[in-house]
Image (cartoon, rainbow, N blue to C red):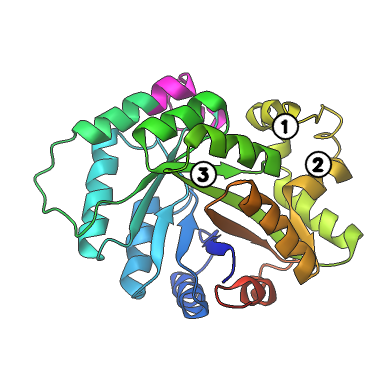
């Protein structure tokens, strides 16, 4: 079976029916889940419900829901309702995002561990007058630093990591322990031309290269300011993105699986210049059961 279980989908700019077509196609390919980021477009939980209604087996996850966008009771209500209505196929991913996103929503930034700990406690203590779902939505938190990973180990079903090297995956597994699920969100690009693949990767990572939280984490693994400047060094790009022919991409995936990842959530990059189409050649190649 493939080591890729899910796909991160950016859907805000797409016509609704096109989102459904893509979800059904991923379901037919055998993927277990799709993950929806919380940006400033469509409301995340509403979109999740729309896609759950259009599919029969695929699980839909918030990847991740910004905790500054909703109070814990709202998140608990949404998770229980979607899990009840759609046969336990909903996954609740949570994260603090970044100070800029909190400020844009009119909130004051709080220390991430304290914010998420209080939020998870609020969900756990929520009293809801609603039917129990067939199974409770699993909760994963976006966690890179050791304290957030420890919080995930104690109060969640596991953690999501993003744009981290395999050595981070190894350390995350050690902190989470063997019982908690570790989801690695990994950009992938099926392109053997190094110049093209790195150009595509730099375009995809441009926003993240400027964020201090990521730079601090990368510094722990030997990268310095020069690596995240001018579009990112080749070394950084090659470490964070699985690119190349199918064998190369699978090798990048395997590095994280061998380091302790339970699930790989692919972020599919299209190697065609400026294309907005999904790279279905990549998604078909990585689909469960493909090899």
- The mark that comes first in sequence, 2 or 1, is 1
Magenta span contains residue 253? no
Q: Quadrant of the C terminus?
A: bottom right
Looking at the image, is 28 positioned above or below residue 65?
below
Residue positioned 69% across, 44% down in the render: 166
Q: Which residue is mark 3?
A: 160
Residue positioned 62% across, 72% down in the render: 283
User: In this image, 285 relative to 71: left or right?
Assistant: right
Q: Which residue is mark 1?
A: 218
**Label number found at residue 5:** none
- The prevailing secondary structure element of the residues shown in magenta is helix
- The mark that comes first in sequence, 3 or 1, is 3
Question: Which residue range is magenta in the image?
Answer: 99-116
Residue positioned 57% across, 49% down in the render: 261
Q: Pick whichever, 180 or 285, lies toward us.
A: 180
Q: Pick whichever, 219 or 201, lies toward us.
A: 219
Residue positioned 38% across, 43% down in the render: 157
């Amino acid at each position: 079976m493939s080591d890729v279980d899910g796909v991160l989908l950016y859907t805000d700019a797409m016509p609704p029916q096109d989102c459904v077509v893509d979800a059904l196609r991923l379901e037919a390919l055998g993927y277990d889940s799709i993950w929806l980021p919380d940006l400033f477009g469509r409301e995340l939980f509403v979109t999740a419900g729309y896609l759950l209604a259009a599919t029969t087996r695929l699980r839909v996850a918030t990847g991740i829901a910004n905790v500054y966008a909703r109070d814990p009771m709202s998140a608990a209500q949404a998770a229980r309702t979607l899990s009840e209505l759609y046969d336990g196929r909903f996954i609740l991913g949570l994260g603090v995002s970044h100070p800029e996103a909190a400020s844009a929503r009119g909130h004051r930034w709080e220390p991430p561990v304290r914010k998420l700990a209080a939020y998870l406690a609020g969900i756990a203590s929520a009293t809801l007058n609603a039917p129990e779902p067939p199974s409770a939505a699993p909760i994963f938190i976006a966690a890179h630093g050791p304290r957030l990973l420890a919080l995930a180990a104690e109060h969640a079903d596991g953690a999501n990591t993003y744009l981290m090297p395999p050595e981070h995956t190894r350390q995350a597994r050690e902190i989470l322990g063997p019982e908690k699920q570790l989801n690695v969100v990994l950009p992938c690009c099926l392109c053997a031309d190094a110049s093209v693949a790195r150009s595509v990767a730099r375009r995809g990572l441009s926003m993240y290269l400027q964020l201090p939280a990521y730079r601090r984490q990368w510094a722990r693994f030997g990268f310095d300011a020069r690596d995240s400047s001018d579009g990112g060094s080749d070394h950084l790009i090659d470490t964070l993105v699985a690119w190349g022919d199918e064998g190369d991409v699978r090798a990048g995936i395997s590095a994280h699986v061998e380091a302790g990842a339970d699930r790989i959530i692919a972020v599919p990059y299209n190697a065609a210049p400026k294309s907005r189409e999904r790279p279905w050649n990549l998604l078909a190649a990585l689909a469960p059961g493909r090899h």
